[in-house]
Every structure is written in C-alpha cells, then in structure tokens.
Image: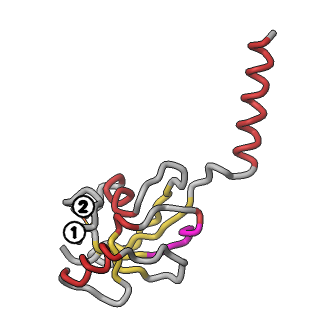
Amino acid sequence: MQLIILKRALALFFIFVFEKNILKDITIILIDREGNRHSLKAPTDINMNLMELCKSYEFPIQGICGGMAMCASCQIYIHSENILNIKSDDEEAMLSEAFHVKDRSRLGCQIQITPQLDGLVFELAPE
Ligand code: FES
C-alpha cells in the first residue's frame, strides 16, 4: 500500500515538474571560428557553464585551467543582449592580460547556464 502511494506521489511530482518546465533546457546559439551558427540545447539544472557546454558538444575550446578564470582559453564574445552575471575581479584581471579581447569578451567558464540565457548568442574567440 505504501509503495503504491509512493509511486503515485512520484508520478504526480514528475508531471508537475515537466508541466511547469522546471527542468526545461534552453537554446543557445554558438558561432564557431568559421562563422557558422550552431543551435545548442543547454541544461539549466546541472550547474554547467558555457565552456563546459562547448566541450560537451566537442567544439574546440580549451578550458586549460578547468574553469578557475586563470587561463582565458575559454574566451568568448557575447553577441546578444541577455543579462549576464557581472564579471568577477578574477575574470576582469584575466581578460586584461588575454589576447584578442573585445568589449563583449567574457570567460565562458564564468557564465553559468541559467534560464535567463535562453536565446544567448556567443562566438568563440580565436585560439
Ligand atoms: S577555463 Fe581557464 S579561464 Fe576559463
């Protein structure tokens, strides 16, 4: 009897979650170094960042420091107007020493994927 109640509660929970789109993936557009646009599905519920998303799709982004804002090998250029987290002092410092930096440069590893990034467009910086 308790098992049946538990199964029904779980079923109701998953129906609620999916109907409310709590676990909804978002779409992010990546522009590669040849100028080609790619539509990527990105999960918002596993604490992934843009550098990790690029790696998961096997795009050539290095991420040498593993996301510690210490290498700038994950530099990207933001093309859309999505509201992003503010750069940390570490990110500012790393970008001040990096090559190919533009006004819209960010470190991909410092941008967590959240629902607010739906429709984000970014480009890989040169290696
Ligand atoms: S992976 Fe090194 S700064 Fe982002």
Tell whether label 2 touches label 1 (CB within 8 Å).
Answer: yes
Give the tally of numbered discs: 2
Amino acid tagged 2: Gly
Label 1 sits on residue: 73
Q: Answer with the quarter of the image where residue 94 lies.
A: bottom left
**Under 8 Å from ligand 1: the CB of mark 1?**
yes
Q: Which mark is residue 63?
A: 2
**Under 8 Å from ligand 1: the CB of mark 2?**
yes
| Quarter of the figure with the C terminus | bottom left
Q: Residue furthest front?
A: 89
Q: Quadrant of ligand 1?
A: bottom left
Residue 35, percent from left and from top: 32, 78
Magenta extent: 116-121
| For residue 89, above or below residue 50 | below
| For residue 2, above or below residue 85 | above
Q: Is residue 97 magenta?
A: no
Residue 12, percent from left and from top: 78, 33
Residue 109, percent from left and from top: 34, 64
- 66 relative position to 113: left or right: left
Q: Answer with the quarter of the image where residue 66 lies.
A: bottom left
| For residue 43, above or below residue 94 | above
Residue located 62% across and 53% down the image: 24
Amino acid tagged 1: Ser
Q: Which mark is residue 15?
A: none
- Circle 2: element type: loop
- Circle 1: element type: loop
Residue 69, percent from left and from top: 27, 67
